Image: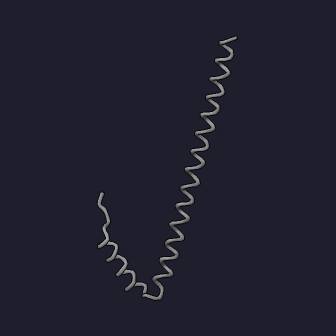
Amino acid sequence: MPTIGWFEILIVVGIAIVVLGPKDFPIMLKKAGSWIGTAKRYVSNIQNEVSNLEIDEEKKIDNEIKKETKKDEQ
């Protein structure tokens, strides 16, 4: 998988400034940052939900195992 270096990023930024203009470039950066932040929050929420589901399932399994061992002991 190819990596993007600082030189490539600099070229893309230069082209963006020429295409968008120096006046609109900061606005576009702010919008892009907002989109990235929204995507990160969305992914984080999904990861937390999956994590919580896994923890709940583990607790259920632990409780079932404890019930079974108590039945066997009696």
How many numbered marks, from 0 up? 0
Q: What x and y, as percent, mark residue 27?
A: 51, 81
Q: What x and y, as percent, mark residue 5?
A: 30, 67
**Residue at (43, 84) in percent of width and height:** 20
Residue extending furthest right?
74
The image quarter containing residue 8 is bottom left
Q: Quadrant of the N terminus?
A: bottom left
Residue 68 horizontal side relative to residue 13, left or right: right
The image quarter containing residue 43 is bottom right
Residue 25 horizontal side relative to residue 49, left or right: left
The image quarter containing residue 2 is bottom left
Residue extending furthest top?
74
The figure's colour scheme reads one colour
Q: Quadrant of the C terminus?
A: top right
Above/below status of 35 relative to 67 = below
Above/below status of 37 relative to 73 = below
Q: What x and y, as percent, mark residue 26?
A: 48, 82
60 and 20: which one is in front? 60
Residue 25 horizontal side relative to residue 12, left or right: right
**Residue at (57, 58) in percent of width and height:** 42
Q: What x and y, as percent, mark residue 19?
A: 39, 84
**Residue at (45, 83) in percent of width and height:** 25
**Residue at (62, 28) in percent of width and height:** 62
Above/below status of 17 relative to 34 = below
